[in-house]
Image (cartoon, helix red, strand yellow):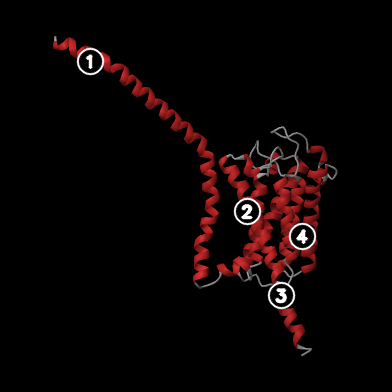
Amino acid sequence: MIGVTPRHDSARREPTFAHPMERLSLVAAFFCVGVGCLVLLGWSGDIEALKRIIPGFVAMNPTTASCLILAGVGLVLQQIRFSRGARVAGSAIALMAAAKLADLVSGHMPIDQILFSGSLGEGSAGQANRMAPNTAVALFLSGLAIAFLPSERHRLRLFSQSLGLAVLLISMFALVGYAFGIHHLRGIGPFIPMAVHTAISLLLLGMGIVCTTRTVGVMLVLHDGGPAGSIARTVLPLAVAIPGRSGSGASMGPAARLLRHRGRRGATGQRQRSSDNRPADREHCRASSQ
């Protein structure tokens, strides 16, 4: 019995990367690391094309880029079964994001102004570059999820998956806000909105977290070969498409109402002109008969 247990543990700790979900999680991790490194390179060299995807868009904050690098490293460490490193990376992300959330309340913990503080001046929109509140919430949830990923407890892994799904939802709303020009989806109140490449990175990060927990919760249902898995695979694309349709309807609503209002005014004016022309037509008919 004593000789069997070490062989079982060593086999369990060997990374395989054979499953597609594990490979997708690695792709998400490397994407986050790459984007974060490019953004930091942009801040160090004052390269606007690396700080922001499109001129005039919000630039990613350097602290956000650092958190994304840590998140990608944490996912990779989890994949190679280095649990302690994954916990440290996740805890560091959660602490930095919590400090930013505390700064939003108190204003005395400007953690997002430590890196490249001399370059975080007024942006193109008249706002100093800071970490957006929804970005801080998403990073806080991501850090907690990565910190709990190495746990063998079913409930904690399910909790990590739920946090990853929440990160997915936050990033999807931000992307829908950018796609349809809805500020309230990509930002909160008067604060700076989430950068578009931050939203893309968080979307992939949330996917990576969820794919890492493929043996519990929603992912277990999606892999089921029975009716439950079939229904879940059918409903999931609808759940992804509904926010986009909602954003489209919200953005097209004012224009549609304006067109309907102009149509009503045009129809009313036409009916009024028709009623005004009726007496003249009757007089013309009487003159013709005489």
- Nearer the camera: disc 1 or disc 2: 1
Q: Residue at x 66, y 55 (%)?
A: 167
Image-quadrant location for residue 42: top right
Disc 2 residue crowd, few under 14, some 14–19, many 20+, Cα 10 Å: some
Left-right relation of 275 to 55 = left
The residue singled out by tag 1 in the image is 282
Q: CA distance from mark 4 to mark 1?
A: 85 Å
Which residue is found at the position 22% from the left and 12% from the top?
A: 283
Using the numbered discs, state the Cα–Cα distance from disc 2 to disc 4 in whole angstroms: 19 Å
* C-alpha separation, residue under disc 3 versus residue under disc 2: 32 Å
Which residue position is annotated with label 2? 169
The residue that mark 4 highlights is 90
- Report the amino acid beneath label 3: Glu
**Cα–Cα span, label 1 and label 3:** 96 Å
- Residue 28 placement (x, y as % from top left): 65, 58
Q: Work out whether residue 58 or residue 52 is closer to the camera in this orientation and state it.
A: 58
Residue underneath mark 3: 14
Name the foreground residue: 120 vs 285.
Answer: 285
The tag earlier along the polypeptide, 4 or 3, is 3
Numbered disc in front, either 3 or 2? 2
Secondary-structure class at tag 1? helix
Looking at the image, is mark 1 or mark 3 earlier in the sequence? Answer: 3
Callout 4 secondary element: helix
Residue at mark 4 to residue at mark 3: CA–CA distance = 22 Å
